[in-house]
Image (cartoon, grey):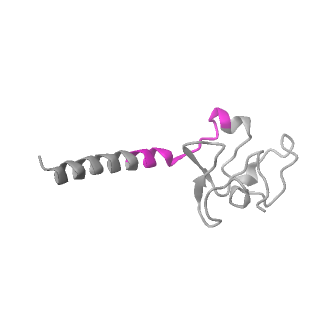
Amino acid sequence: MSRTRRVFLITAAATGAGLAGAARAQAKLDEKDPQAVALGYVADATKVDTKKYPKYAAGQVCTNCALYQGKPTDAVAGCPLFAGKVVAGKGWCSAWAKKG
C-alpha cells in the first residue's frame, strides 16, 4: 500500500470517528437526566416551578445565559454544565447567569 493511500485511509478513519463523536454530542438533554433534575432544567422556561425556583424571572432562557454556547438564534446548543448534550434555547435551569 502506498504511503499516500495509507495516510488517506488513516485520515478518513479519524474523520469518521470524529463525526460519529460529534453526532453523539448532539443528544438533547432529557429533563429527567440526574444533572438536569439537580439543576431544575426545563426545555421550556415558561414551565419553571416558580415556587421551587423563586430566582427565576420571566425572560430568562438558555439563549441569554452566559453559559449557553450557541448564538441567540440557535434552537439548541451546548452548555458546559451538561457535557455531551445540547440544551433548548428556550430552556432554563437554576444556574442561569445573565450574559455580560
* Furthest residue toward left: 1
Coordinates of residue 8 in the picture (x, y in percent): 23, 53
Which residue: 67% across, 35% down? Answer: 35
Which span is picked out in magenta?
20-35
- Location of residue 44 with respect to 74 vertically, above or below: above
* Furthest residue toward top: 34
Coordinates of residue 34 in the picture (x, y in percent): 65, 32
Which residue: 74% across, 41% down? Answer: 40
Coordinates of residue 17 in the picture (x, y in percent): 36, 45
- Residue 71 magenta-highlighted: no
**Is 52 displayed left or right of 15 in the figure?**
right
Which residue: 66% across, 50% down? Answer: 43
* Furthest residue toward bottom: 73
Q: Quadrant of the C terminus?
A: bottom right
Which residue: 84% across, 40% down? Answer: 52
User: Which is nearer the eye, 66 or 47?
Assistant: 66
